[in-house]
Image (cartoon, helix red, strand yellow):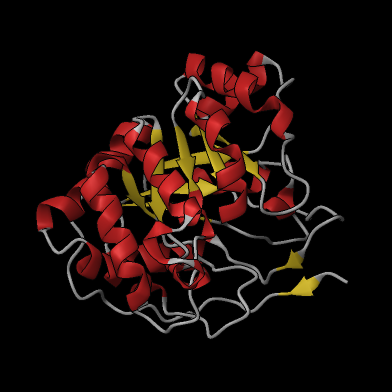
Amino acid sequence: MVELCQGPDPHPRRPRLPAPPLATDTHFHILGPAARYPYVLEREYTPPDALPAACRHLFQTLGIERAVIVQPSIYGADNRCAMDAAASLGVPVRVVVVVPYDAPDQELALLHAGGARAVRFIVAHAGGLPLADLERFSARAKDRGWHIQLLLRASDLVALEPRLARLPSDFVIDHMAFIRPAEGGIEQPAFQALLRLLRGGRCWVKFSGAYRQTDEAPPYPSLLPFARTLLQARPDRLLWGSDWPHAVFKGKMPNTTDLYDLLGDWAPDEKTRKQILVDNPAALFDF
């Protein structure tokens, strides 16, 4: 049975610290309306609509001026919803798409013109692109100035580390690979693998989905040493994403502003926050 999701808190608050000019949300989804953009039949969840108008309200509240829409698993390789939303959000937008390796160059060129800059491999859910195509798609992405984005779990990261370390293109790990502090602290194998990849120079890591990594309430104190360790390693390879509308989350829904305010705890230095919110995404996503 396909699970029905709760929606996000519709009332974001003003953040504790103002966002710098050109602040970027590098990870969110636009969902629906399903009558216009139908979901794939073989999916794990059905969300309520999360439409551009609600997203614009969120961005105006937080001070977000650039954005990256990420293709969710429930749309498979049908990128129409994300690409259409990119043209209607009212801020500069990039898109992370899901497209098969054998897609013709003409299709990739059209996606690029609409804002696409990355291909997403969804390992943590069913129905993603086959990992057999990872290396050759990475090479194709590099030739186009794109990168690879991966949604995977901690155990996947450990298993894939040797392959990821050899990818020719840059690649991004979503949600810190869902690494949970309760499963071994910063010494656990998955986090050490993440650190090695980050230090390798082609890996980027998203500060996103914190509420998925711990059962704590905001500000998720057990994640602080993980975030600080990543910051010490490569502050020039870290990104922030809201993960709005927080699909298929079963716990108490956070206010999205709680997730933005985490940066004030994780990166107290204003210069570092600007690097995460402005400079790093500008470099990676070609803003």
- Residue appearing at x 43%, y 60% in the figure: 208
> How many numbered badges does the structure rendering display?
0
Residue 82: in sight, yes or no? no
State the residue in front, 19 or 202: 202
Would residue 131 be visible to someone looking at this image?
yes
Q: Quick one: 160 or 32, which is closer to the camera?
A: 160
As displayed, is residue 86 above or below residue 284? below
Q: Quadrant of residue 7?
A: bottom right
Q: Quadrant of the N terminus?
A: bottom right
In the rendering, at what x and y percent does residue 43 appear? 80, 58
- Name the foreground residue: 228 vs 64: 228
Residue name at image x 17 percent, y 66 percent: 18
Residue in view at x 36 percent, y 74 percent: 222
Above or below, 116 relative to 239: above
24 vs 132, left or right, is left
Residue drawn at x 37%, y 45% as measured from the top left: 195
Say above or below: 277 vs 6: above
Q: Quadrant of the C terminus?
A: top left
Across and down, in percent, residue 105 comes to 64, 14
Residue 55 on image: x %, y %: 46, 63
283 left or right, relative to 128? left
**Where in the figure is residue 200, as x and y percent of width and height?**
36, 31
Based on the displayed image, in which of its 4 quarters is residue 186 positioned? bottom left
Q: Is residue 156 left or right of residue 181?
A: right
Tell whether 273 sits left or right of 80: left
Up-down relation of residue 212 to residue 65 (above or below) = below
